[in-house]
Amino acid sequence: MRTDSDLYAIRPGQALDAAIKGMKNPDDTKQAARMVEALQGRSPLRMLQRVKRSSKGRRLLQERPDLLSALKDAKWLASLPEGTLGREYYEFCQREQLTPGGLDEAVAEGFDRSRLERMSEDEQFLQTWMRDTHDLYHVLTGYGTDLLGELGVLTFTATQTRNPAIWFMVLVGGTVFAARGHANPRLFAGAIWRGLRARSIITPNWKRLLEQPLSQIRRELRVPQPPRYKPAYTSLDRSAMQL
């Protein structure tokens, strides 16, 4: 597997193409996935090494919880007590008009599956894990799915994972926001501070945490209360929802 010379190769052409298309249409999630794949290089391998250093991380790799199935079980999520992470996630999806666990299709379109399959099973699991936990990070941090909210959660995640591909997405997103008059350096700096302050968001068993109170999870992971900011949407229908 490690003999594949292009497994961790950087693909600047793909990244540039995805960045241009992403700036034209920030709602095109597939382009974000293409940027990550093109620029992450050896980040998945380095993240795996960090995960293996902790007992919680090793347990996660051993158990490999099926988070996606739980996130797609809307009936079960809706039945959870108010204030639990799972119930908050369900209400978040209803409020933002998202399909629970819906990122899997968009990411699948953006990633080269043959390249992913050449990674180790642990690396593949972590790639899937980061995809499936993304919207949970929105709930955890309090950032919405608007332009600035995505910038916030991506910056928070990039600080935690040290993935250069995610930092590049933050740069592209920041450029789009500035061009549209939505620059918010305070939100950007705050997301970095929150990411540095928090404990690891990668190694917790998020499937198990769905039944736990969100306030308790935030305390344990040292994630401060959600920030206040004015949402910035891209499409007319989402903007109209805020009127």
Image: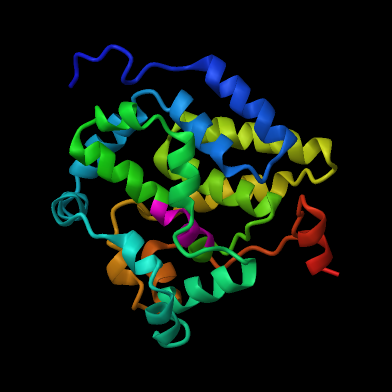
Q: Is residue 3 left or right of residue 181?
A: left
Above/below status of 35 relative to 180: above
**To which quarter of the image does residue 66 belong?**
bottom left
Q: Quadrant of the N terminus?
A: top left
**To which quarter of the image does residue 211 belong?**
bottom left
Residue 78 is covered by the magenta coloring: no
Q: Is residue 205 left or right of residue 220?
A: left
- How far across and down, in percent of the image, does residue 39 sit? 47, 24
- How far across and down, in percent of the image, does residue 18 sit? 60, 28
Task: Count the marks.
Answer: 0
- How far across and down, in percent of the image, does residue 111 sit? 43, 33
Q: Quadrant of the C terminus?
A: bottom right
**Residue at 24% from the left image edge and 27% from the top image edge:** 118
Q: Nearer the viewer, residue 1 or 176?
A: 1
Question: Is any atom of residue 181 visible in this view?
Answer: yes
Q: What's the magenta bit mostly, secondary-structure-wise? A: helix
Which span is picked out in magenta?
Answer: 132-138
**To which quarter of the image does residue 81 belong?**
bottom left
Above/below status of 195 relative to 2: below
**Residue at 40% from the left image edge and 29% from the top image edge:** 112
- How far across and down, in percent of the image, does residue 116 sit? 31, 32
Above/below status of 61 relative to 76: above
